[in-house]
Amino acid sequence: MTQFIALSQYSLIEITGIDAEKYLQGQVTADVTNLEIGSSTLTAHCDPKGKMSSIFRLIRVEAEQFYMLVRTSLLPTALDQLKKYAVFSKISFNPLDDAEIVGVIGETDLAEQIKFGNRAIVINPKSAVDFNADFSAWDLADIQQGYPILSDKAQNEFIPQALNLQAIEQAISFQKGCYIGQETVARAKYRGANKRAMYAFKAATNITPELGSEIEMQLESGWRKTGTVLSAVNIDDVLWLQVVLNKMEDNPTFRLPENHVALELQSLPYSLD
């Protein structure tokens, strides 16, 4: 059954102006010049050290009009950072607080869909939508499909590759020109500077760990806390986690520190190589 979800965890920002493309090209990790009208991609905005202040879906509406679909918890910091150098550019950022943002998992005939995988986003649908799933179902799909969920707890903590963005859509371009944090992102690719990746786990428990907390890994001498919980969704006592860990070559055993429930590592739909 197709799920229709009110994406209340997101905000929509309209970005317009004759300098919109040029300005965004010098800010985000994606190649904005190659983004066609009606298309979208996940992308990141970094600080000068290459640490991400935001991950968002960039949608090209028209040649000089873009939408930024961003988790509300990242605001206002994410928007303030993106606007930081815009004073000399002909560009404006307008929060669309009244916009209706609909997430669709499965097939739909709603017009003006922005599709990726088996999902779509519809902004201000022209017909009424019968919502039949909670916003946590969208977050669950993100975890299952390997899309990182960045919260304010982890702003300016990770470089894009630590959250697997090099493997998702056109989130990072290694061919475009300079942008903020580009030196760090390039070094992580070409010099192997990134030692971390994002993994997904599943467990049968009613516990939902705090964002930013750790899990435990089994060693020969016992258990050691490791990693950073990036996101957590618990639906009907089934816990799903995204955890940033040092890259794994084998398959160690993990558990929750709170109740020692085993965490089952989930396969990702893309390669981390």
Image (cartoon, rainbow, N blue to C red):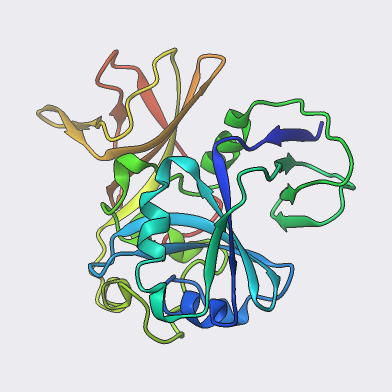
Foreground of the two, 234 or 266: 234
Does residue 166 sit above or below 229 in this rendering? below
Q: Quadrant of residue 158?
A: bottom left
Residue at x 42% of width, y 60% of height: 272
Q: How far across and how far down the image is residue 52, in percent?
A: 34, 58
* One can see residue 162 in this view: yes
Residue at x 31% of width, y 39% of height: 153
Foreground of the two, 21 or 170: 21
Does residue 95 sit above or below 141 in this rendering? below
Q: How far across and how far down the image is residue 198, in percent?
A: 38, 48
Residue at x 44% of width, y 70% of height: 28
- Is 118 on the left or on the right of 167, as rendered? right
Foreground of the two, 38 or 200: 38
* One can see residue 273 in this view: no
Q: How many marks?
A: 0
Q: Quadrant of the C terminus?
A: bottom left
Does residue 206 sit above or below 185 in this rendering? above
Foreground of the two, 102 or 217: 102
Q: How far across and how far down the image is residue 112, in percent?
A: 82, 57
Does residue 53 sit above or below 62 in this rendering? above
- Is 94 on the left or on the right of 248, as rendered? right
- Is 142 on the left or on the right of 257, as rendered? right
Q: Quadrant of the N terminus?
A: top right
Q: How far across and how far down the image is residue 92, in percent?
A: 53, 68
